[in-house]
């Protein structure tokens, strides 16, 4: 799986678990909803790059690199 796919999958899972909407995530990141929709919406047009991945992790109080780990992998470490 590509890193962009892993990040998107983890991003969507965390939003669902925390019951956050994209507009709420945009507020947490200080970005426009359209920017967040571009990488995390139903039909993303951009991937989640390194910088935004770290911003998301910080905003959601996740450890650095969390979005890069395939789901379930870190449960065994």
Image: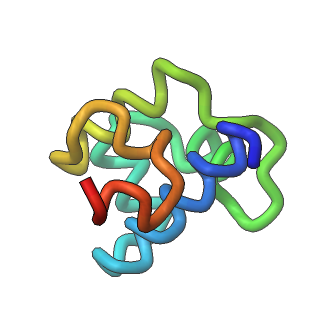
Q: Is residue 47 left or right of residue 57?
A: right
- From this view, report whether residue 64 is shown above or below residue 43: above
Q: Nearer the viewer, residue 71 or 52?
A: 71
Q: Position of residue 2 (x, y in %)?
A: 75, 41
Please tell me which residue is depicted at 77% across the width and 36% down the height of the picture.
Answer: 46
Please tell me which residue is depicted at 29% across the width and 62% down the height of the picture.
Answer: 76
Q: Nearer the viewer, residue 77 or 63?
A: 77
Q: Is residue 8 left or right of residue 14?
A: right
Q: How many marks?
A: 0
Q: Which quadrant of the view contains residue 35? A: top right
Q: Is residue 12 left or right of residue 67?
A: right
Q: Nearer the viewer, residue 10 or 74?
A: 74
Q: Nearer the viewer, residue 21 or 11?
A: 11
Q: Position of residue 68 (x, y in %)?
A: 49, 40
Q: Position of residue 21 (x, y in %)?
A: 44, 70
Color style of the picture: rainbow
Please tell me which residue is depicted at 47% across the width and 19% down the height of the picture.
Answer: 51
- From this view, report whether residue 70 is shown above or below residue 32: below
Q: Is residue 5 left or right of residue 53?
A: right
**The furthest residue to the top:** 51
Q: Position of residue 59 (x, y in %)?
A: 24, 41
Please tell me which residue is depicted at 29% across the width and 75% down the height of the picture.
Answer: 18
**The furthest residue to the front:** 76
- From this view, report whether residue 64 is shown above or below residue 69: above
């Amino acid at each position: 799986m590509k890193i962009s796919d892993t990040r998107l999958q983890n991003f969507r899972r965390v939003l669902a678990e925390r019951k956050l909407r994209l507009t709420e995530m945009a507020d947490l990141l200080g970005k426009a909803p359209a920017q967040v929709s571009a990488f995390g919406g139903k039909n993303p047009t951009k991937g989640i790059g390194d910088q935004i991945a770290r911003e998301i992790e910080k905003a959601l109080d996740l450890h650095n690199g969390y979005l890069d780990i395939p789901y379930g992998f870190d449960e065994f470490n």
